[in-house]
């Protein structure tokens, strides 16, 4: 067990933090939601009811949407674009890598590499495909959750009839929620790319080695 934790410590801590914070988000969101319902003279929701509400679904997936867009775009763009001096960039003189081609496969290469064909075509782009696919899924669920939350709020405030997801897609409410997250994600990645040119973190693979010059690009 100790060896397994050591080999998987980074993902263990990251997903552990995720579970902790999403539980805390749900608890605090539940309290906020019930405070709103009480203000409108409505009965409070149970915790389990809240987890299926538009309020919670919208809040969760509008953030997931931006995270997966950021990471999917980052993976894809770093395959083609460079940033002089950044550890997040591939070297300026590296147009391609020999290890990205099937003819250089070894005995320990993944199965799709050995099979070739469509399996290899998907596998060689699978990271960006899956990340952007998760973005698309989160975008749709955010839209559905946002529609539900909008309809719930309208029913409480004015008793107006519900609208469809397609109509909510055309509202500024939805795009405001998305843009406020998208801009912050790209700002954070851009800051990491540029700050890594001149700043270092001893021992981190996201940083260049401490003794490397500012113009050195890549790891």
Image: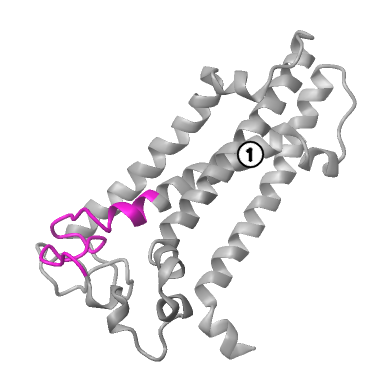
Q: Which residues are magenta?
A: 73-96
For residue 168, above or below residue 211: above
Farthest residue, direction right: 43
Farthest residue, direction front: 117
Q: Does residue 21 appear left or right of residue 54 in this picture?
A: left
As helix, strand or loop, the secondary structure at mark 1 comes to helix
Find disc 1 in the rendering and name its residue: 141
* Residue at x 90%, y 26% (from the top left corner): 43
Q: Does residue 37 appear left or right of residue 108 in this picture?
A: right
Q: Quadrant of residue 102?
A: bottom left
**Residue 173 drawn at (x, y percent):** 55, 21
Of 140 and 9, the residue lying toward us: 140
**Residue 36 drawn at (x, y percent):** 76, 24
Which quarter of the rendering shows the C terminus? bottom left
Of 153 and 25, the residue lying toward us: 153
Q: Quadrant of residue 12?
A: bottom right
Of 162 and 47, the residue lying toward us: 162
**Residue 205 drawn at (x, y percent):** 32, 71
Chief SS of the magenta region: loop
For residue 142, above or below residue 123: above
For residue 99, above or below residue 79: below
* Residue at x 70%, y 52% (from the top left corner): 23
* Residue at x 74%, y 45% (from the top left corner): 27
- How crowded pointer 1 is (Cα within 10 Å; few <14, some 14-19, many 20+) is rated as many
Taking the magenta stretch, the answer to whether it contains residue 143 is no
Which quarter of the rendering shows the N terminus? bottom right
Q: Quadrant of residue 207?
A: bottom left
**Residue 121 drawn at (x, y percent):** 40, 64
């Amino acid at each position: 067990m100790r060896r397994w934790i050591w080999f998987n410590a980074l993902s263990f801590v990251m997903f552990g933090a995720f579970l902790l914070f999403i539980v805390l988000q749900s608890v605090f969101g539940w309290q906020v939601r019930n405070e709103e319902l009480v203000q409108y003279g409505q009965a409070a929701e149970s915790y389990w009811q809240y987890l299926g509400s538009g309020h919670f679904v919208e809040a969760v997936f509008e953030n997931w949407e931006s995270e997966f867009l950021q990471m999917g775009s980052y993976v894809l763009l770093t395959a083609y674009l460079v940033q002089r001096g950044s550890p997040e960039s591939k070297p300026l003189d590296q147009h391609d890598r020999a290890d990205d081609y099937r003819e250089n496969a070894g005995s320990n290469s993944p199965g799709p590499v050995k099979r070739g064909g469509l399996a290899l075509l998907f596998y060689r782009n699978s990271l960006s495909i899956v990340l952007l696919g998760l973005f698309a899924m989160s975008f749709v669920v955010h839209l559905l959750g946002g529609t539900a939350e909008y309809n719930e709020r309208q029913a409480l405030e004015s008793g107006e009839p519900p609208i469809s997801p397609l109509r909510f897609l055309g509202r500024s409410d939805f795009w405001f929620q998305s843009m406020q997250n998208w801009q912050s994600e790209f700002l954070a990645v851009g800051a990491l790319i540029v700050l890594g040119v001149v700043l270092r973190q001893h021992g981190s693979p996201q940083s260049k080695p401490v003794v490397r010059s500012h113009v050195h690009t890549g790891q």
